[in-house]
Image (cartoon, coloured by chain):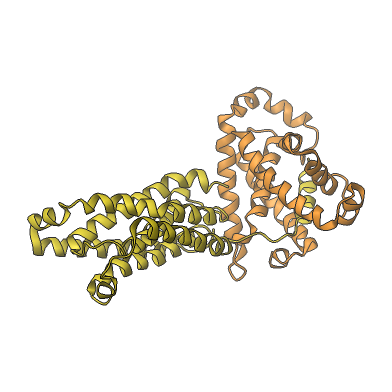
Amino acid sequence: MRAANRGDAAAYRRLLQAITPALRAVVRGRGNNMTHETCEDILQDVLLAIHTRRHTWHEDAPLRPWLYAIARHKVVDAFRARGRRVELSIDEFAGALAVECGPDPMQGRDMEKVLDALEPRAAEIVRAFGLYGETTAETARRLDMSEGAVRVALHRALKSIAQLRERMIE
Amino acid sequence: MKTDDLIAVLAADTLPQATVAQRMMRSLPLAIGVSLMLFVLFWGLRPDLTAALTSPVAGKTLVPSGLVIVAGALAFALSHPGQRWQRRFWLTGLFIALLVAGFALALARDGLTGLAAALGTPALLTCLASIPALALPLLAAVLWALSAGAALQPRLTGAAGGLMAGGLAAAIYSLYCDQDAALFSLPAYSAAILMVALAGGLAGPRLLKW
């Protein structure tokens, strides 16, 4: 995390990949009658929160308590918001079925909705990194932007995504 | 989108983010400037300021300034998950308890008639209106800075930010106010600061959400 906060993308990615299984287990454990898709959406909410709040962790403080505090807050938040959306009553009928025939257990649903609501160019940049696995240089070349502009656009897009998800769920 | 793909996106975003402290450094001096400008335009310094600041009356400025530090430290800790804020919470409580004790002492000395005489002045309304008015830009700046944090208790965090902004506004207002009786300044300033803290607490859940 220390390296990540200094801009080491590879170290940051490893960290996020390392904590994700534990976070997924926590979310699934709490949402026992929710579909895997919904659980994955909540997990993605947590990861986004970790990302947009990563500077509230102090370098010399232990990482684990901070991580747990962020995750717990976000999980509680997400379950509360989705409870209001009568998600649960639908799942009660379709739950068992949906879990079995759900497309991919690691797949979320909210992100597509949010990306559709985002400005097209910003959404394209997010897709470039997420779905096509491009590097900053490749995206910059394809969209005819400078690398710096791509970085700024991605940074802003993630901020809007975090805000949009919050609003769209409620 | 798959979670693994999202991780790839997040890892690609390496731009540094503004911290609470950085935002505070940017917004607070600006807001203090605005408040001071309003103060000079509509209130102005009391004529005997130097005499007042070299007497015990200076407490009217110093005590709210102390509150700014204590409440500010609390708000800062509350915005950073994993940081221990409980001790700062009790420190702020102790600060307020000392003020209450000071008030009780003054009340025991002068009695209720003394309190009625001290508060029975139009300056009371001026004080109750001026401190929140001066605090408004300060509160906005503080809450904006705190919103970069990750408050787990937005109501309490907002209230601590309100105490900070209110204390700062009271310290500024004290440079105008010529009511020096402890039985005036203690209850009147406290009530005005409390109003600002209440406003911060009410705004917290909405503005400090993340």
Tell which of B148 and B183 is nearer to you. B183
What residue appears at the point 55 percent right and 37 percent down from the top-left corner?
Answer: A80
- Indicate the position of residue B161 as horizontal and vertical percent values: 44, 56
Quadrant position of residue B190: bottom left
> So how many labels did they put on this image?
0
One can see residue B87 in this view: no
Instruction: Tell me the yellow chain.
Output: B
As drawn, is B54 to the left or to the right of A80? left
- Indicate the position of residue B132 as horizontal and vertical percent values: 36, 51
Tell which of A135 and A23 is nearer to you. A135
Q: Residue furthest bottom?
A: B54
What residue appears at the point 8 percent right and 58 percent down from the top-left corner?
Answer: B111
Tell which of A38 and A127 is nearer to you. A127
Q: Quadrant of the C terminus of chain A?
A: top right
Instruction: Tell me the orange chain.
Output: A
Tell which of A124 and A8 is nearer to you. A124
What residue appears at the point 25 percent right and 70 percent down from the top-left corner?
Answer: B48
As drawn, is B159 to the left or to the right of A50? left
As drawn, is A20 to the left or to the right of B133? right
What residue appears at the point 19 percent right and 64 percent down from the top-left corner?
Answer: B182
One can see residue B173 in this view: yes
- Indicate the position of residue A2 as horizontal and vertical percent values: 69, 67
- Indicate the position of residue B143 as horizontal and vertical percent values: 49, 53
Q: Quadrant of the N terminus of chain A?
A: bottom right
